[in-house]
Amino acid sequence: MKIMIRRSPDAGLSIYVPKKDLEEPIVESEYETLWGGWIKVANGWVLDLPEMPSGTALPITINAKKRGESGDDP
């Protein structure tokens, strides 16, 4: 799914999903640099992010893969 990752002064890192008109803060990430690992957002979704250079500028729109609900969350 296409998501936008951005940083805001009050909320920190968050994602925006245009097709669902959903914005959620990122509450946990596998890697400090985000890229190539999973992130967890406040609504419970776990998304796998693509490999990107650690200095990638935000905001950015990327394709992320949502993990299933059947226990494959971290």
Image: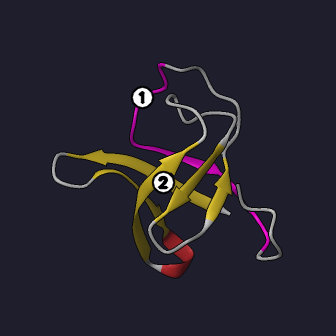
Q: Is residue 70 magenta?
A: no
The residue to which callout 2 is attached is 4
Q: Could you tell me if the residues under marks 1 and 2 are in contact, i.e. CB atoms within 8 Å? A: no
Quadrant in the picture for residue 66: bottom right
Residue 74 vs 45, above or below: the answer is above
Q: Is residue 57 magenta?
A: yes
Q: Is residue 1 above or below residue 48?
A: below
Q: Residues within 10 Å of mark 1 (few under 14, many from 20)?
A: few
Q: What amino acid is found at the position of numbered circle 2 in the picture?
A: Met
Q: Position of residue 1 (x, y in %)?
A: 68, 63
2 with respect to 8 (left or right): right
> Is 71 placed left or right of 12 in the picture?
right
Q: Residues within 10 Å of mark 2 (few under 14, many from 20)?
A: some
**Helix or strand or loop: what does disc 2 sit on?**
strand
Could you say which quadrant of the image residue 45 lies in? bottom right
Image quarter in which the C terminus is found: bottom right
Residue 27 place in picture, x, y as percent: 43, 55
Looking at marks 1 and 2 on the same chain, the residue that comes earlier in the sequence is marked by 2
Q: Which residues are magenta?
A: 55-68
Between 29 and 48, the one lying in front of the other is: 29
Amino acid, disc 1: Ala
Say which residue label 1 marks: 57
The structure residue drawn at horizontal position 70% and vertical position 39%, both measured from the top left corner, is 50
Q: Classify mark 1: helix, strand or loop.
A: loop
